[in-house]
């Protein structure tokens, strides 16, 4: 979990849904609804700045300090150990975020059958994935990157995948 997800809402709808101000730098980066968001993409996230919620974008996938190249991406962080892992501890303590999503994909093994996990009908179309921001060095530059926090699957999902 979670290697691909969907976010089809536009930025103004997300801003209203999360009661968040739009980060002015969003205009610098093209955003389009995406039904197959992959690691390394720039994704909308909700963070807090000066006591107010802000909708901004960061790159999905933390490049750990021990990595010799920027292709090593940590896209998920286990909720059970995120506070203790050196790569995530500071970010978890200081830079938690919400990652808006309309749903995410899981592949049931061994057949690799795809499943789309989304909020129940009648609920909000948007759910929040827990996440954290950490600075990574990519091509010699500091870049704000993020990871999604995962947990053990609930009983209704564990037949598909052991994490959610």
Image (cartoon, rainbow, N blue to C red):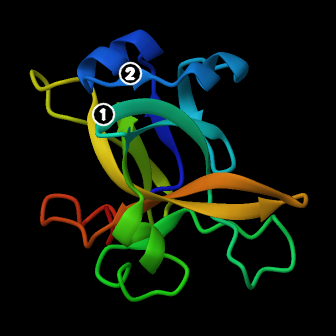
Is there CB contact under 8 Å for labels 1 and 2? yes
Circle 2 SS class = strand
Q: Residue at x 37, y 35 (%)?
A: 100
108 lies above or below 121: below
Q: Which mark is residue 21?
A: 2
Q: Nearer the viewer, residue 33 or 86?
A: 86
- The kind of secondary structure element at disc 1 is strand
The image position of residue 156, as x and y in percent, is: 14, 58
Q: Is residue 104 left or right of residue 32?
A: left
- Camera-side residue: 161 or 42? 42
> For the view shown, which residue lies furthest in the right direction?
139
Residue at horizontal 35 percent and vertical 81 percent from the top: 83
Query: So how many labels did they put on this image?
Result: 2
123 over 114 or under it: above or below: above
Give the left or right position of residue 119, taking residue 67 as reference.
left
Is residue 162 in view? yes
**Disc 1: CA contacts within 10 A as few (<14), some (14-19) or many (>=20):** few
The quarter of the displayed image where residue 124 is located:
top left
Give the numbered dot on residue 3: none
- Pinpoint residue 110: horizontal percent, then vertical percent: 48, 69
Q: Earlier in the sequence, mark 1 or mark 2?
A: 2
Identify the image quadrant of residue 75. Answer: bottom right
| Horizontal side, residue 44 vs residue 135: left or right | left
What distance separates the C-alpha of mark 1 from that of mark 2? Answer: 8 Å
User: Where 16 falls versus 63 (above or below)?
Assistant: above
Vertical side of 155 occupied by 119: above or below: above
């Amino acid at each position: 979990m979670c290697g691909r997800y969907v976010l089809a809402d536009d930025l103004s709808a997300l801003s209203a849904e999360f009661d968040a101000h739009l980060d002015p730098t969003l205009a610098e980066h093209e955003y389009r609804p995406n039904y197959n968001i992959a690691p390394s993409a720039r994704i909308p996230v909700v963070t807090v700045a000066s006591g107010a919620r802000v909708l901004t974008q960061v790159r999905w996938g933390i490049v750990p300090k021990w990595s010799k190249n920027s292709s090593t991406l940590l896209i998920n962080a286990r909720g059970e150990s995120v506070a203790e892992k050196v790569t995530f501890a500071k970010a978890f303590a200081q830079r938690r975020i919400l990652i808006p999503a309309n749903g995410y994909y899981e592949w049931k093994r061994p057949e690799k059958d795809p499943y789309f996990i989304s909020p129940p009908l009648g609920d909000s179309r948007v759910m929040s994935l827990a996440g954290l921001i950490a600075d990574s060095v990519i091509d010699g530059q500091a870049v704000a990157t993020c990871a999604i926090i995962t947990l053990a699957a609930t009983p209704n999902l564990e037949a598909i995948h052991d994490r959610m």
